[in-house]
Amino acid sequence: MSNYTLELKNLTKIFGRRLVFKDINYKFETGKVYGIAGSNGSGKSTLSKLIIGISSPTSGKVLHKFNNSTLDADYYHNHVGFVSPYLVLYDEFSAEENIDYFSKIRGVQKDSSRISSLFEEFNLTDRKTDLLKGYSSGMKQRMKFIFALQHDPELLIFDEPTSNLDSKGKEAVYNTVNRLKNNKLIIIASNEDADLKLCDNIINVEEYKS
Amino acid sequence: MKAFALFKKDWQSELRTRYAINALAMFILVTISVILFSIGQENISEYLTGGLLWVVIFFSAMSGLSRAFVSEEERGTTLTLQLIAKPSTIFSGKLLFNVLLVFIMNTAITILFFLLFESFIIRDSGTFIPSFILGNIGIAVSSTIIAAIISKASSKGTLYPVLSFPILLPLILTLLELTKFSIDGQPLDESLIELTVLFSYDMIMLTAGYMLFDFIWKD
């Protein structure tokens, strides 16, 4: 089993005069599911963005370690799978074409049987050749999970993973988390009690406001 | 290969959405038509026609080349790109796309100038062709990095030409000079200083682009 750890060291983010959070020190390890909790606008998504390296902290550090070697921020994308409400895939392409292009741009070999089983898991096999612009919001949300899991990443960050999903969709997400939790480092940022029930440890962003 | 895959994705996306091509084609047609109508039966000098060529090219670039990044920002797919590739790959892919677009656009404009303006006569293509190639690369590189900067701003349409003008000015001035030489029939070996300036401009912008893109790309 690969070992992925994530360390937040004195992580602080300030937007203008607004302090989002201050001095977060936390260590995440493979084999556990972590929750990021907090009310709307408390900074859960901001923390997720800092973790995946698409936003810079005001001070402090985020360290990604894969098998005890620290990763350069430029290469996080090969190890991270991310689902979020503000993630948008390409509407002018079909689900299959999206996945094809993402594999090529990532520079990874597309594992067709793995991709097929992901389409099965998220119940999109029948619609995988349809353009994404014809998808409902729930289908687009399920498609984001296929996008996040296609390259078999070690770190999975699910920001509000069950938004727009019906009960069947939520069940698919929970089954996926349960299937992967022993071999992956999973972080769920959510307000939903049902989502946070999956977590072994919960970090509340609101505790880091002063 | 990764950058080429991104270029292919952008090209396929462009063919399906016609985000930039339609805007560029319409802009070129309208601008050249306006120039033709305003000239009427007047005879304009060869140098002026050469100057008008680069004016049309500059404003056409302003109308279409920002799309490489602006379209991603407007559709909300910037985050998706950030999640699948490192910044240098994104920059290379977008640059390839803009280089192709610039070459198609500028070749079309130049052909239209040859067909529609009697006073557009290039006597020495040995000077014109290398300056055209280096000029196109310069426009594509500068436009790509400026497009990345303005894509995060709220008033993208205004900011793009405003920010581009001072950056593209040395390039356009050198291209005007080289076009004048080509019209005069000055041979290539007498235009080497200007061509070296063009080449240096391209190299500086390319290096600056790769160095700056990391900072522009992150929030």
Image (cartoon, helix red, strand yellow):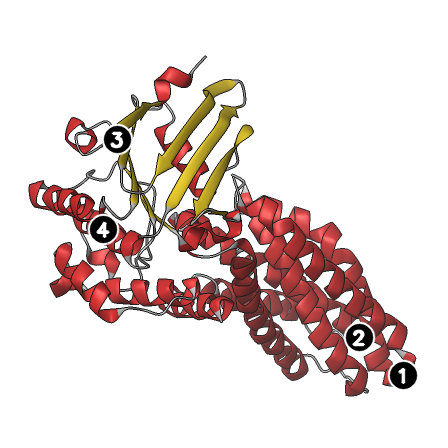
Name which residue lies at 46% across and 43% down.
Answer: A64
Q: Amino acid at mark 3?
A: Ser
Chain letter of mark 4 equals A
State the SS at label 3. Answer: loop
Q: Are marks 3 and 2 on the same chain?
A: no
Inter-mark Cα distance, 1 to 2: 15 Å
Query: Which residue in the rendered view is the most extreme toward the top?
Result: A210
Name which residue lies at 22% across and 51% down.
Answer: A140
Q: Give the residue at mark 2.
A: B179
Q: Are marks 4 and 3 on the same chain?
A: yes
Q: Give the residue at mark 3.
A: A190
Nearer to me, B197 or B174:
B197
Inter-mark Cα distance, 2 to 4: 52 Å
Between disc 1 and disc 2, the foreground one is 1
Between disc 3 and disc 2, the foreground one is 3
Tell me, yes or no, if residue B45 can be seen here: no
Nearer to me, A85 or A131:
A85
Q: Quadrant of residue A113?
A: bottom left
Q: Quadrant of residue A59?
A: top right
Q: Are marks 2 and 4 on the same chain?
A: no
Q: Give the residue at mark 1.
A: B189
Residue A178 at x, y percent in the picture: 16, 44
Q: Amino acid at mark 2?
A: Thr
Q: Residues within 10 Å of mark 3 (few under 14, many from 20)?
A: many
Above or below: residue B106 compared with residue A118: below
Inter-mark Cα distance, 3 to 2: 61 Å
